[in-house]
Image (cartoon, grey):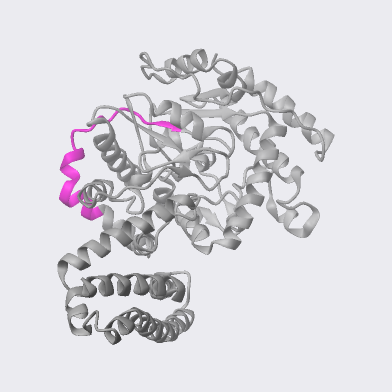
Amino acid sequence: MGDWAAAVLAALAFAAALGRAGILGVARGAAATAGAGVEAMLDRSLGEEAQERAVQAAGLALLGASWGLAWRFALCLLAAALPVLPLWALGLADPGRVLALSLGWEFLLGATLVLGAGAWAFGRRAPAAATEATAYPLAERLLHRAAFASPGVLRAAARLDDRLLGRAAGGADSRPPVFVTSLPRAGTTALLAALDRLPGLAAHRYRDMPFLTAPLLWNRARRLLGARISRRERAHGDGLEIDLDTAEAFEEVLWMLHWPEHYGADGIRPWAAADARPEAAADFRRHFAKIVALRADGQGRYLSKNNASIARLGLLPEMFPGAAVVVPLREPSAHAASLLRQHRNFTRLHADDPFAARYMEDIGHLEFGRLHRPIRFPGFDRTEFALGSLTPEDPDYWLRYWIAGFAAVEAAAAAGMPGLVLVDQDDLRAAPGATMRALCAAIGVDAGEADFAGAFRGEPDPRREEGLDPALLAEARALHARLAAQAVR
């Protein structure tokens, strides 16, 4: 009985020493350091010298962490021996028998279960908040680095997907896709979520990351691995929660692969009908068919939500004849305020979490923060702003951007762009059911018995004047009124 008591006391002392010594934190730090070294080797944005310095620094840090782990573990073993020594001196326990007992599978299993249950109960008392940016584990970060190591890797993944599983998408519905696009913060995410409820549409999901160009292979691998993430708030801080099954915008990766020359340091150059490329159209059609095969058993239309596609109003009808292009409208003063708020939010996020910036750059989300590259709409030349007269920190910058963006939409509507459908955010909030059914009728989608209650915020956008140029605001509101008069109802 004394040997059992000594073994239990030794285990408790060892566990307490582990906690006090911070050995688990050092181990996690060592793993993170090793991961950082691997990430540096996979980071195409670093030069060879920078990569070598990063790997050397990681190696030195690992040596220090190894020494830290060694002496801490030695202290934990000493702490485990301390309760045994007095019992041995009193003749109540034998160190040899205590050691043999402690290494037995029954004792190890029982101690593991008890200590694990205690750690779980303690962890539940103070759960850590997770967001889209901070909840990306080390293994997933390394996988992301590998998947986006170069355009060649993305293309090779697509070819492998075609060769091994492409036949599964061969019978997928080839009806024209539905594109949802507008400036960011226009309500495209809420509209995507509402349309994604309909069985006849198929969209990308978070589970398609990071091997976006090989969705069939990667989704099969995810099923085998049983990968899942808990529901959490996305990085925008707008209260919208995501999980692996949340629809999201990821196809920009394909546009960047086929038209890298459109993505300049000073902004994104809009596309025109003359930019159409048959090989790109074929690649997109294959990719869309894979998503339809995954999400709608091959019977449905591909659903895209991609804010950057507002730069492609001249190209989409040429590349995808019969496609519907849905553009949500939002009251310009509220829209500009939301754009400014998100720019500041992502400026902080990118400074605090470099991987979040890398993640968003890889998937083509270049709207905000240090990644901000505006679409170079006619009438919006960022070179004049670069001189310091107007910056993305100014509300009028975003109001000018709004005017330029929606002037392009108005020009497309005036030119009779096929498939263009406008929907007003105010209508979606005031009468979601009627507005969504009118939209579905306009784009040729069966709304069935879908319930759109709660799909959109109920309260109207507050109209703002403070900090905005009155003449610019009047121009924006006049443009909004003209476009809203053409919206479906």
On screen, 145 above or below 295?
A: below
The reply, left or right, for residue 335 in relation to residue 173 is: right
Query: How far across and how far down the image is residue 247, in percent?
Result: 40, 37
Query: How far across and how far down the image is residue 207, in percent?
Result: 34, 46
On screen, 360 above or below 455?
A: below
Residue shown at the point (40%, 59%) measured from the top left: 137
The reply, left or right, for residue 215 in relation to residue 122 is: left
Q: State the extent of the magenta-drawn residues as a range.
A: 159-179
How many numbered discs, if any?
Answer: 0
Q: Quadrant of residue 316?
A: top left
Q: Quadrant of residue 449?
A: top left
Query: How far across and how far down the image is residue 68, in percent?
Result: 42, 83
Query: How far across and how far down the image is residue 302, in percent?
Result: 34, 33
Residue 25 visible here: yes
On screen, 238 above or below 370?
A: above
Q: Quadrant of residue 98?
A: bottom left
Q: Nearer the viewer, residue 254 or 201?
A: 201
Q: Nearer the viewer, residue 152 or 42?
A: 42
Magenta stretch holds residue 156: no
The N terminus sits in image quarter: bottom left
The C terminus sits in image quarter: top right
Residue 41 visible here: no
Q: Nearer the viewer, residue 262 or 483?
A: 483
Magenta stretch holds residue 165: yes
Residue shown at the point (43%, 80%) measured from the top left: 58
Q: Nearer the viewer, residue 201 or 74?
A: 74
